């Protein structure tokens, strides 16, 4: 087989070689489908073996196999959620739809089309599902299946399902209406997808009204695009805002940003830490400063110092509590930047967990803590799972060993870097492979408050720079104690650092 090489040019490739390339593309696609079928058989066999082992150990039936998706997902470089979805689909192929599985195994059916066969028959009985499986993917129907488009395949499945069990189809439609909902998920460039799953007639009507409003606005001279007008109108109507004020919607954003970016005009991106279902994501430094400025203008911004050592590791003390206190939980979420600490998992942090269980002597500390999603936290409770905290390149890491002996290591992401030390000529130190120590160290040992005073979290923030520079201190206003309302600002807040030393 002639493959394209680095020295080939478009004029040097013959028609025969191009025809062979097309043949090879088709053969490789068939191989992909065969590999998917093999992965499905392996995943189902692993689940059955795991459940049999746990049954012998006396594990309750509803808990057996709970950790299998967390083994399947990382092995396939997928999240545990995606691994569980693949496992469920593969189980349906092998147990209920043998013709679909054979078509996938022989390369006739792609993974997506085989998944549609499972999805569109999930509401039917096993008997009716088997009939559709044979009528579409049976040996006599494979030539027609190979010529059938995906939309036509879905229509054919629904047609057969309606003929076999119309009541099941009606019940499925009624169930779908009961599952209407609104969801939000992150999109690139600090955007989100706001999705509404509603009955068809309601969705079409809402879209038609937004489109009509946009067309009328464009006809009246509005310079925005039709899509922009529709999006702004949706937000204005949902949030109860006046026209043209879609941006004036109060929202809380947890922003993880370095002092260099926030105060000194640095260019390192900030991170929007999980705090809502919108998820997480890096944002450019100017955008981060703009978010903070808008919060200050609205008198709704507050700052919390997170102290790090010269290698970027967060500093915190241990706790004697069984559960992580709120302050320590916030540090753990900030360290994980809001994403589950399991390898390949992109779900938001929902549980704050002990790496070494508390019942086995694990401390309630930053080093023994991790942020996980609910699925990953429950999966590691299954028999045979082991975890231990470690360090890689100075960053917190968790080593997970599965019941089959496979090891996965999850490393915490790098935090925003603090202000760098300046060199003698006024320039900045270049970045090296090893992170240089920051030019200042937070004064975490500032001393206790005077006798009779109650310490507060915002009592004082200070740091020192070096023998040739004076101390830098930032003291918030007096009206910041517990139970006190913040003073209304008449203008922009002054967040500059009071530096009494000579200018550099």
Image (tube, grey):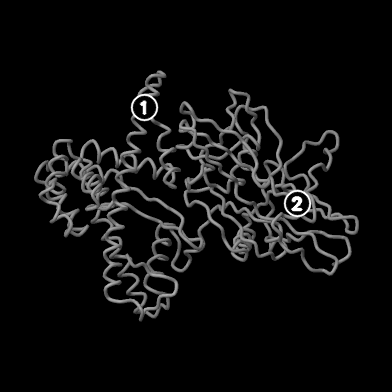
Indicate whether 495 appears above or below 223: above
Front-most of 326 and 156?
A: 156
Residue 173 in sight here: no
Query: Cβ–Cβ below 8 Å for labels 2 and 1?
Result: no
Dividing the picture into quadrants, the one containing residue 3 is bottom left
Q: Earlier in the sequence, mark 2 or mark 1?
A: 1
Indicate whether 294 appears above or below 456: below
Q: Whole-Å distance between the Cαs marked 2 and 1?
A: 58 Å
Residue 266, horizontal then vertical, whole percent? 69, 64
- Mark 2 or 1, closer to the camera: 1
The answer to whether residue 136 is left or right of residue 252 is: left
Q: Quadrant of the N terminus?
A: bottom left
The answer to whether residue 183 is left or right of residue 151 is: right
Residue at far right of view: 468
Residue 454, horizontal then vertical, whole percent? 77, 36
Front-most of 4 and 344?
A: 4
Find disc 1 in the rendering and name its residue.
51
Residue 232 in sight here: yes
| Label 1: element kind | helix
- Which mark, residue 476? 2
Front-most of 38 and 300?
A: 38
- At horizontal 84% and vertical 60% (from top left) the residue drawn is 499
Residue 42, horizontal then vertical, whole percent? 34, 38
Q: Quadrant of the C terminus?
A: bottom right
| Label 2: element kind | loop
Dividing the picture into quadrants, the one containing residue 367 is top right
Indicate whether 302 appears above or below 94: below
- At horizontal 44% and vertical 75% (from top left) the residue drawn is 7
């Amino acid at each position: 087989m002639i493959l394209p090489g680095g020295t080939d040019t478009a004029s040097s490739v013959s028609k025969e070689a191009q025809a062979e390339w097309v043949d090879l593309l088709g053969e490789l696609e068939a191989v992909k489908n065969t590999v998917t079928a093999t992965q499905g058989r392996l995943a189902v066999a692993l689940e059955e073996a795991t459940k049999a082992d746990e049954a012998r150990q006396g594990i309750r039936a509803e808990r057996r196999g709970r950790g299998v998706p967390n083994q399947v997902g990382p092995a396939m470089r997928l999240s545990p959620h995606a691994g569980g979805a693949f496992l469920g689909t593969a189980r349906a192929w092998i147990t209920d739809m043998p013709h679909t599985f054979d078509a996938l195994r022989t390369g006739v059916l792609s993974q997506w089309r085989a998944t549609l066969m499972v999805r569109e028959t999930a509401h039917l009985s096993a008997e009716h599902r088997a009939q559709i499986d044979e009528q579409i993917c049976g040996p006599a129907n494979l030539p027609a299946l190979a010529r059938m488009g995906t939309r036509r395949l879905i229509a054919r499945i629904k047609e057969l399902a309606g003929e076999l069990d119309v009541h099941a189809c009606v019940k499925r439609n009624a169930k779908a209406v009961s599952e209407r909902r609104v969801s939000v998920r992150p999109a690139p460039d600090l955007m989100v997808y706001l999705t509404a799953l509603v009955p068809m007639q309601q969705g079409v009507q809402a879209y038609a009204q937004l489109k009509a409003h946009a067309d009328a606005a464009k006809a009246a001279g509005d310079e925005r695009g039709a899509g922009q007008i529709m999006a702004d109108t949706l937000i204005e109507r949902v949030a109860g805002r006046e026209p043209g004020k879609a941006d004036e919607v109060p929202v809380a954003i947890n922003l993880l940003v370095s002092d260099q970016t926030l105060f000194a005009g640095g260019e390192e991106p900030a991170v929007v830490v999980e705090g809502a279902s919108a998820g997480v994501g890096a944002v450019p430094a100017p955008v981060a400063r703009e978010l903070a400025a808008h919060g200050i203008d609205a008198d709704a911004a507050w700052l919390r110092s997170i102290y790090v050592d010269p290698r970027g590791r967060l500093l915190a003390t241990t706790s004697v509590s069984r559960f992580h206190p709120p302050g320590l939980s916030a540090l753990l979420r900030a360290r994980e930047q809001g994403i589950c600490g399991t390898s390949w998992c992109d779900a938001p942090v929902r549980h704050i967990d002990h790496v070494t269980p508390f019942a086995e002597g694990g401390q309630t500390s930053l080093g023994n803590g991790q942020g996980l999603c609910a699925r990953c936290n429950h999966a590691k409770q299954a028999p045979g799972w082991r975890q231990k905290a470690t360090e890689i390149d100075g960053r917190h890491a968790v080593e997970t060993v599965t019941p089959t002996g496979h090891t996965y290591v999850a490393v915490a992401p790098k935090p925003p870097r603090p202000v760098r030390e300046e060199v003698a000529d006024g320039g900045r130190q270049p970045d090296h492979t090893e992170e240089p120590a920051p030019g200042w160290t937070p004064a975490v040992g500032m001393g206790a408050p005077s006798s009779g005073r109650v310490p507060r979290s915002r009592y004082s923030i200070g740091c020192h720079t070096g023998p040739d520079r004076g101390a830098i201190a930032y003291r918030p206003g007096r009206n910041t104690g517990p139970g006190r309302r913040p003073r209304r600002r008449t203008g922009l807040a002054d967040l500059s650092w009071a530096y009494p030393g000579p200018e550099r």
